Image: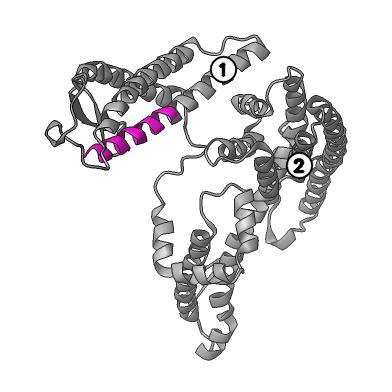
Amino acid sequence: MSTDALRQNMLRMKEIIREMYVFTNQLNLIKNLEATSKIVINLREKKLLNDAIDSLMVQLKILNKSIPELIGDVMFYKKLTVSEGIPEVHKTEAKKELVQIKYRPSINKEKVEITISEKDRREFLENLSKSNLTINQLKNKFSVERPIASFGKPSFYAKTSNKFFRNTSNKLLMKGYLEPLNKDLRRMNSPFVVGTYASMILFTMMLAAIFSILLMVFLLFYKISLGGITPIDEPLLLRFFNIFWVVLAIPIGTGMFMYFYPKSEGRNISAKIDQELPFVAIHMSAIATSGIEPTTIFEIIIKSEEYKNTRLEFRKLLNLINFQGYDLVTALKRVAGSSPSSKLRELLDGLATTITSGGDLHEFLDKHAEGLLFDYRLERERYTKTAETLMDIYISISIAAPMILLMLFIIMGSTGMFFLGLTTEIMAVLIILCLVILNVGFLLFLRLKQPIF
């Protein structure tokens, strides 16, 4: 009984120390931000963090006071009594009465059982209630100890795909066929592991195959034209050979799209990171002038809302350090290996080398920021020239061409000549529709190509 109680107390003390470590780091981060930026971050958050640390400290002290009593009850030998010949020199102090308390630290955790003295029970429960309330407020309002990305419960589609194709995807994974796909998924920060995503590809291809078979059966007897759906008047066997490609094209096309989508999305994320990176490096260089710890630099960058894509990579870095126990250099190399951006990989590898060799972090970031900013200026010049070329094309197509066509239609209408039997009014409406589509297409293209910085 005493051994189990001692073990339960030690486990709870370990959990309390872990929570205190998290909250203390959060409080130090806020203080560093205030010291570097000269801005008061949030007084309520600081108060909640201090209250949570104080309450946890009281609980830790109470649990620590119960350890000697619990250890005293653990015996590995039979204690001799006075009747067996050993006189009792003095009486020991009366032992404190111990009581067991069962409670649930949070809604998502199981009940724990601790053993403390009777007189400390009330104080412990008061601090427990206070700390739980404070911690819940911190987690709900200020995202303390919140995961990088909470993907929630597995999707129904992913679970269904695993039921059908989990064994097949595991075999492909064991043979190494899915390694390129795994790298692409990690670079796009996908919530799915490679085995589940492979199962989803196979399951989607199966659904596409069923759909293509039904479509082929329909097309065997009917054809779709501008006049509507009409029956087929050609031989059935000949029709079958003409449309058999549908059964293969739709599933294969669907599978190829899902397989190459992570690579395409990774390139898109890489382009966005490359646009943010010059300003991230300048920001990091400015922070490094204060001489603070390198890990704190990444914590400050994450606090900023300006670098949406680079923040995700830095969050992975801090998760490796805070939750998986990696040192900073190893975490930098691991994140660099999975980053979709080659420029970010160079920055993280350079930081790892600088920290290992004991170099000047500010000087490295300053020089690297200059190079990134030079590349950024060249990229903006190329974008400006591309925009000028598109403007010339747009003027030629949307302004000059319609005017020439309208003049031709007027001449054709005056002479009684019509193109494909269309009147001048119908052609004018078609030209207006084409211009609308053309303008929307140009706006979408420019929007997609426009840099975010």
Residue carrying label 1: 30
Place of residue 128 in the rendered image (x, y in percent of width and height, measured from the top left): 30, 22
Location of residue 120 with respect to 224 vertically, above or below: above
Q: Disc 1 or 2, which lies upstream in sequence?
A: 1
Q: Nearer the viewer, residue 119 or 387?
A: 119
Residue carrying label 2: 349
Q: CA distance from mark 1 to mark 2?
A: 28 Å
Q: Which residue range is magenta in the image?
A: 1-17
- Label 2: how many residues lie within 10 Å, few (<14), some (14-19) or many (20+)? many
Specify the quadrant of the image occupied by residue 309: top right
110 relative to 37 in the view: left or right: left
Q: Nearer the viewer, residue 259 or 131?
A: 131
Q: Secondary structure at mark 2?
A: helix
Under mark 1, the amino acid is Ile
Number of the label disc, if any, that sits on residue 198:
none
Location of residue 19 with respect to 55 vertically, above or below: below
Under mark 2, the amino acid is Asp
